[in-house]
Amino acid sequence: MEVEKYLQVFENVAKRRGWKLNPDRELLIEFAKGLIENRKRYGIAICPCRLATGKKEIDRLIICPCVYAEEDIREYGRCYCGLYQREEGSFESIAVPDRHAKYYLG
């Protein structure tokens, strides 16, 4: 998938879920490139802000948008990586804890 197609996917996901995209277009492009690279590397579009474990059942949790995104956006206003955000407000400076970190330690 090309970068522009990923940007459209981001838009579609955000619209469908009632979110907005991070307003930084360069950041969106870097996310798209990271997803393309991870898709080549791992066979799935793992969030470029997360580390793959090599265990498919665990790594599937962090396919963008990850399973944590909705809860993170509800609680912190944005997802862990900041790609998706709540419709109202500015959330760039808010730190979101990594709910997936438990899989890196075990």
Image: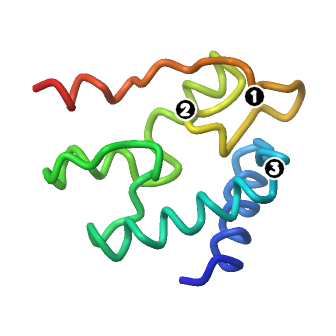
Q: Earlier in the sequence, mark 1 or mark 3?
A: 3
Residue 84's spot in the image, x, y percent? Answer: 68, 42
Q: Residues within 10 Å of mark 2 (few under 14, many from 20)?
A: many
Residue to which mark 1 is pinned:
92
Vertical placement of residue 75 versus 83, above or below: above
Q: Residues within 10 Å of mark 3 (few under 14, many from 20)?
A: few
Vertical placement of residue 97 versus 28, above or below: above
Residue to which mark 2 is pinned:
80
Identified by mark 2, the residue type is Tyr
Identified by mark 1, the residue type is Glu
Residue to which mark 3 is pinned:
24
Residue 58's spot in the image, x, y percent? Answer: 21, 44
Q: Earlier in the sequence, mark 2 or mark 3?
A: 3
Residue 88's spot in the image, x, y percent? Answer: 89, 28
Label ID, residue 12: none
CA distance for labels 1 and 3: 10 Å
Secondary structure found at label 1: loop
Secondary structure found at label 2: loop
Identity of the residue drawn at 69% across and 18% down: 94
Residue 103's spot in the image, x, y percent? Answer: 21, 30
